Image (cartoon, coloured by chain):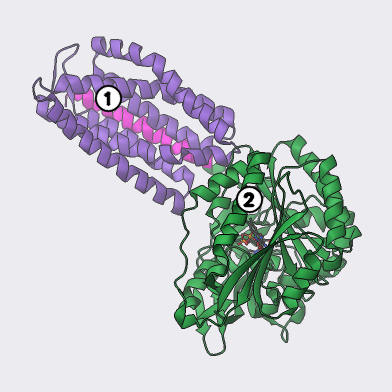
Chain colours: A purple, B green
Amino acid sequence: MKAVAMRYVMLSQNVMTLGSGIVFPFYLISIKEIGGDFTQYGIAYGLFTICSAYLNGYFGRSSDRFGRKPFLLLGSWGMAALFLLFPLVTSIWQVYALQVAMGVFGAMQRTCEKALLADLTEEGRRGEQIGRYHMGLSLFSGLAVIAGGFLVDYFTLDLIFYFGSVLLFASGLVLMRVQEKSGRAGMET
Amino acid sequence: MTARARLFTAVAVILYAGAFALSLTVRSAMPRGEEATDVGRIVSAKVDKTVAVRTTEDVAAAIREARREGRKVSVAGTRHSMGGQTFYEGAVVLDMRRYDDILDLDTAAKKITVQSGATWEKVQEVINPHHLSIRVMQSQNIFTVGGSLGTNIHGRDPSEGSLIETVDSFRLMTEEGKIMTASRSENADLFRAAIGGYGLLGVILDATLRLTDDVVYTQHTSLLDYKEFPDRLRASVESGSTGLVIARISTAPSGFLREMYMTEYMDSSIPLADADTRLNGERAVELTRFVYGLQRKYGWGKNMSWSLQERLFRSNEGKPITRNNAMRPESGFLEYRDAQKSDLLQEYFVPLDRYPEFVDGLRTLLREEPINLVNITVRYMPRSDESLLAYSRQDSAALVLLINEKRSPARLERLKGVTQKMIGLAEQAGGTYYLTYQPFASKEQFRAAYPAADGFKAAKLAYDKESLFMNEWYAEYLR
Ligand SMILES: Cc1cc2nc3c(=O)[nH]c(=O)nc-3n(C[C@H](O)[C@H](O)[C@H](O)COP(=O)(O)OP(=O)(O)OC[C@H]3O[C@@H](n4cnc5c(N)ncnc54)[C@H](O)[C@@H]3O)c2cc1C
């Protein structure tokens, strides 16, 4: 049933948003701590976006063939693994490398999430359904930023990476509950 | 889920748990460390960690742990010093900002006891309803009491010396975790060394400060030539009715180091009951920030801002303002976080009568070797030599230079050279420079300006035998 699949996708993506949302706004601090400035922050962020730009098309096409779920899974678990590397970073070059890798997983996640949404929503009610989906997502990203700020203030920056990583991994586990008929067909649970 | 999916999930969980554990293991094997710097951002160091102190026991525990691990300890307030005074390579930094309780307010005796992490702003909020006011503080109120004691700051009130003169006593935790009380009658040597002692004798826990009455001033601003300044300032101070005084000397191309404004906050007969005693919030600072931005970048910006100030002063002429409000001017516009540049402060103290000579020297020097001088304020600093590292051992004009500079090694090296020449000018005129800012002075210049340096070091070593307390500034000049 599409509705059930949709619910799991929503839950999974909400957890995913929470996981990445507690990290991203405070990411700058990590670069600062290894001695970077705003220019380097710009480069790091730009790399992330540019890398994912090229790959969006590729992953989009592949997901039409192989299904969205494998890519979404790889996206969140890959990101979860990368977050485990951030606390170990000692130079700006490692940050750049991680950003490039994150760009790859980010592209999988973003494109396939949108494609999956289109798969799971019904013509005629699509706006309503996407609206509901995004409401949850925005809520969670707001909560994530607040929680992230709190964590950075009271604990260490490393902690938010570990915490975010666990959440990203968990979002993948939730996604496992979504069953996808291969190819273009819809999804069922 | 199918059996296959379940197996897949289980394998994923196990792999992830393994990766997580691996990451944690590697992380904990890595040397701890974080980059520490201050608002000047030209000195930095990799410190072991920063401890956010909340209780006295936190201080004691951090000291014990540092000793056990063979580490040094640095003490930090809001880190508005600008030359590595708040951190040291490999050290544990005590961040005192949350150790900020008001312990006692005795309105009859006009005294307040505060924990050292409290800011002046907090103190003002507590004492304002009681119509009391701080005797000596910086021009802004954003600093901690501990940081202010650590540097023995001074401000705009010409009838007061430096902060030490308003301190009755303080309690300090030593390297052994022992709490000592210091005042003029008890451990007087510690009193004189630790105030203005840059956190090198121990951690000041709390201090009892003398307060004064909040009163209503009226503001008067006059335009004058730098040569008239010593006499005008002296007359103002000696009149006994000047509560606060602050002057500016132009850094604009048009009146470069000649034209001055002097703003006096004069005692008025207006009773406090008739005045607006509510504390100013931070007003809209965006416009000031914008003007400051132009002033940083362009000569015409400096000209414009100079004449804008004239208009501002005229509109404030005769306006009543409470002492407490005059002592919390807007400062948000000073916040400046450029990726490449820093706003750097420097301060020179020159005997009042030799002020024109110093300014002439400065003008000649800066014409030959220009620096981006955004602003100069001039205050009166009466003789105040109680602190061992006293900077004003005679009645002085205190010039604060705000310099905008790129933080590249080449630019800083050049600024260091110019700074040494400026210090040379101050010393020629019988003056000194302030230790709170960049560590640009040569060691000889430091010794010349602070003849008690050896005495200070001896006092430090008497109370801090193992030199547990350390910062980059001390390591540069005294170790
Ligand atoms: C914009 C600006 C304006 C300024 N205006 C003035 C001014 O008008 N007059 C003036 O005199 N100075 C002025 N200063 C300098 C400023 O007052 C000093 O840098 C002061 O130390 C800042 O307080 P802080 O809380 O930031 O101290 P920090 O920079 O954090 O610490 C300063 C020193 O005090 C020590 N210290 C801090 N807390 C303790 C403690 N609890 N026990 C023992 N030692 C401690 C530190 O180890 C360090 O050596 C100004 C600086 C800036 C950036």
Local SS, label 1: helix
The answer to whether mark 1 is within 8 Å of ligand 1 is no
Q: Is residue B157 above or below residue B435?
A: below
* Quarter of the render that holds ligand 1: bottom right
| Structural distance between the alpha carbons of marks 1 and 2 | 74 Å
Is B17 magenta? The answer is: yes
Q: Nearer the viewer, residue B104 or A64?
A: B104
Residue found at x 81% / y 45% = B366
Residue ID for mark 1: B8
Label 2 secondary element? helix
Q: Chain of mark 2?
A: B
Tell whether label 2 touches label 1 (CB within 8 Å). no
Report which quarter residue B175 is drawn in: bottom right
Percent from the top left, x then y, of residue B145?
Answer: 60, 69
Q: Callout 2, which amino acid? A: Ser
Q: Which residues are magenta?
A: B1-27
- The percent coordinates of residue B234 (x first, y second) are 77, 73
- Who comes first in sequence, dot 1 or dot 2? 1
In the image, farthest residue toward the bottom: B108
The residue that mark 2 highlights is B307
Quadrant where the N terminus of chain B is found in the figure? top left
Q: Residue at x 57, y 73 (%)?
A: B218
Q: Mark 2 near ligand 1 (CB under 8 Å)?
A: no
